[in-house]
Image (tube, rainbow, N blue to C red):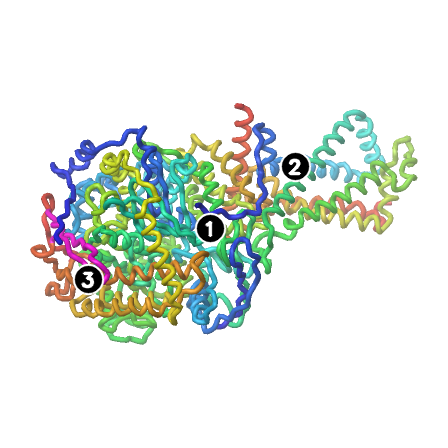
Amino acid sequence: MNFKLKVWRQKNAVSPGSFKDYDAKDIPSEASFLEMLDIVNESLTGNSEDPIEFDSDCREGICGMCSLVINGIPHGPGKGTTCQVYMRRFTDGDTIWIEPFRAAAFSPIKDLVVDRSAFDRIIQAGGYIVVRTGSAPEANSLPVPKHNADLAMEAAACIGCGACVAACPNSSAMLFVAAKVSHLGLLPQGQAERETRAIHMVREMDELGFGNCRNYYECEAICPAEISATFIARLNRDYAAASAQEALTV
Amino acid sequence: MSMTLDSKVPSGPLERKWSKHRGESKLVAPNNRPKFDIIIVGSGLAGASAAATLGELGYNVKCFCFQDSARRAHSIAAQGGINAAKNYQNDGDSVFRLFYDTIKGGDFRSREANVHRLAEISLNIIDQCVAQGVPFAREYGGLLANRSFGGVQVSRTFYARGQTGQQLLLGAYQALEHEVAEGTVKMYPRTEMLDLVLVDGHAKGIVVRNLVTGEISTHAADTVVLATGGYGNVFYLSTNAKGCNVTATWRAHKRGALFANPCFTQIHPTCIPVSGPYQAKLTLMSESLRNDGRVWVPDKKKDPRPPGQIPESERDYYLERKYPSFGNLVPRDIASRNAKEVCDEGRGVGPSGLGVYLDFSDAIKRHGEDTIRERYGNLFEMYQNITNEDAYKTPMRIYPAVHYTMGGLWVDYNLMSTIPGLHVLGEANFSDHGANRLGASALMQGLSDGYFVIPSTIANYLATQLGKKVSANRPEFKAAESEVRLRINRLLSIKGKKSVTTFHRELGLLVWDKCGMARDAQGLKDALQKIPALREEFWQNVNVLGDGAEFNQALEHAGRVADFLEFAELMCLDALDRKESCGCHFRLESQTKEGEALRDDEHYCYVSAWEYTGPNTPANLVMEPLTFEYVKLSQRSYK
Amino acid sequence: MSVASPSTAPVRVFSKNPFIAFYQSSIGKKYVVAVTALILILYVLGHLAGNLQIFIGPDRINAYAKLLHDLGPILWVVRIFLLAAFVIHIVATIQLAHENRLAKPQKYAVPGYQRSSTAARTMLVSGVIVFCFVVYHLLQFTFEVTDPRYHQLRDSLGRHDVYRMLILGFRHPLISLFYIVGLFLLTNHLSHGLASVVQTLGINNRKTANFVASGGQTLAWVVFAGYVSIPVTILLGIIK
């Protein structure tokens, strides 16, 4: 298969970027999207042209490292991450636009690579249950209703890729934050820090320059881990309750 | 040069060694802990759990990873689960049984004391992770669920859907980020370790490259901990993440750390077959598929018929035929080897002929499609996405792929390497899995090392180092840094004709062919001839564009491949030396009449620890004899 | 030596006062938008119920108008309350929109929307037009400045003849058209807004999510039908 690529090239965070045209020739339909880029890069290298830089690591859809926007869609067409997109999804001769995740809170690094460390900062603000190693009680001493455990697992499945932010017209990180607040807040182990967690994570998210949720649900539509936007409603509820408690106990 | 290895295994009865050791270990008082700087390289299960716990204890921790976040380390990809001898199922499990299964599964090539400690700690790991909020599967009563996994006869595996590694890593990552917020851990993402710095023979720092800016810098500390994972990517194609590499451990090896059992590499039987030369990575399908899938190939060679048209009488369910009691559930090494065997006979399936069928039609007939969908729906979907085939209608095609490496830097009972002050955790060390790792044991080992072992044993070293702090201004640091710079400049100045990937792929094909699922002296000697030649060519003809002072993935890759090109030689050398078959290491010269692996306990009951002697001299073999007091060495049989 | 990346994101700093901090946060501000929206929605429904009395006859609607007028100061309290809700709704929305614009400095070359409705993406535009519509509506029928005759209209009992005023007003096709367009945009605004309120206030969950989404749209179109029925029946001469 052959494709016309329009790829965002940007030397570094401070240089302006622009789209450049490339031809992807003789691509097997069984190749993954990233393998297609590998092939293009091999031929660029052969011609002494700088290869296109993009993030990827596990290439099996779980690490959350890959991060392309393909034809305006974070992680491209279909379910899952960019590394799970296969070229047979496209038609021979297609023009494909490839861009980085765009958000003020994700600053560019080079070409298609962006800095998503803001997500780590949000977790640092409260995305954990504090347990001193070795002081944990016997695992079965606290039963967790299966329904809650399953729901917590659904929320915990977030891979932290940042596609929710990329897809959101406002670059809101609400789905990411909602997933973590819900995962930990649904479990009995997470109750002690439930209020402070919601407050600190939301405010950290705001301070980092993510936008506001306007209930577009673009995030839910493209989330490779299929995190439900109803967790956002849960976060709204938790945050309001926590704020009320904060205000009343000051 | 002669060297003896002291494993520092405590004396006394097996089940009391660990508690005795902790009782006798040195301590660092809480007020002294902030005076110690600890460098941890790697932030997977072992690295993140160690960094979080050591930070929590009050040490000053710097943690480095090449990924953009600690959460992306490849531990995240483990699907199946984590073993623990909780005996919640009341099915006869015990610490001893987990210990025994792990020793036997490793084909008696690991240390009894280490493995027993691992089995003991497995209990604490589950408690710790549950308290952190890891959403393990539960039963309707709200208690933890278990499943049976990887060819053992008890249900001791804890799991979180098919994403156990992810959930355990996120637990450790969250604990780590909490310590970052507390200020006890400083995280350095997108930063790669390129060398180890020794001061007076002790590991006292590292040289790193900031992968965003290209800046090279040094960091000094009182001790260095490597938790940098395995070297499976020496084969180019593996189920490892693209970034996994041997650089950190190889650099440490070249600085004096002995490398143990490098030839012990695990090949996982259920991966999606290679579809073409462009392929960058192999995808693992959970081993649990073998619970319901039946493995077969056609009787006839190069049978062109689609699977549905091959009648039952012309199919060879070879695992069921050869291993009636375990059938399709034989351990990984045996399943892999047999797949290779039938493909070598020309009976492999799929376009490449390198594949066997994993057929669910009987299971679907028996349990109904809905049940199978419930059990493996996500795996079937993943398979369809990659291959464009519907496994509900036509059998899956699977083929073995490199998955895990049991070998690694040699460590003693304190997890310290032969370089004083250099500790090694998780897949990066050699310690617990012998010649073959059982399913659901890697996660257990990573977390055991990180949460429970190193926080206690590191004090044995640190307590001797009070007041011996070194500064990164010392000449040893400057020297190591300039070596790193020189090497980078050399890589960038070659501007040859072949890409880094081309070399990596060539190396991978070579070692897969000669040092893969089956090895023999002839092939290994051949590889030992070809690897240095390929390495030579690499340094003459590799093409790395761009420059060093910027984000440059080709340069990162080039450095890693350069190290793989050196490491591959040691791996083949080790494989050549070990003339027995054991675990994943199958020497064609050493098999039983039925073609099974034949161990040679009389001559090879030792750990091969290799000492670096220079660029053009063969590594020196140092043996750590293995003695077994509590288990009887037996030939593994799964017939 | 950690990676220092220039972020174009604006910096929000939170107040120590929990009430102010709540409003400063994204969720807090959205809560305010949702609560004021809820007040305005209730008003829209109440106002509709009042207006539909026109179909019962002139006596009924004029009596209803008198009842409201006779509330005196209470009416003003309600009006000020509604006005406040309206203003807060607009101010908070503008602030949110400003933050959102800063958060996404660069759009994609090809838009790849997967889920969001046009109604959702045009809330700001529909909101602005609805605002203009409301201003005109108040000038016309509350302050009666668009047509001086409205003020003098009295029915047989000497009450302000709201019935006649509506008929006079809506007999102009252009005015009716303007109303229908305004109401259409209000409906658009509500079709996303109703479900959005439920989501933002956190009363949504996966059992209610589908019902809330479709229920919100249905209700919005019911409101549209209800309101539009008045100018349409007047234009068609059904009500004279």
Chain of the residue under label 2 = C
**Amino acid type, callout 2:** Leu
Q: Residue placed farthest to the top in the image? A: A249
Q: Residue B571 lies in what quarter of the image?
A: bottom left
Chain of the residue under label 1 = A
Circles 1 and 3 on the same subunit = no
Q: Percent position (x, y) of residue A93?
A: 53, 72
Q: Disc 3 designates what residue?
A: B617
- Mark 3 Cα-neighbour bin, 10 Å: few <14, some 14–19, many ≥20: few
Q: Disc 2 designates what residue?
A: C38
Q: Is residue C220 left or right of residue B336?
A: right
Q: Give the range drawn in magenta.
A: B605-627
User: SS for tag 3?
Assistant: loop
Q: Percent position (x, y) of residue B397?
A: 32, 65
* Front disc: 2 or 3: 3
Circles 1 and 2 on the same subunit = no
User: SS for tag 2?
Assistant: helix
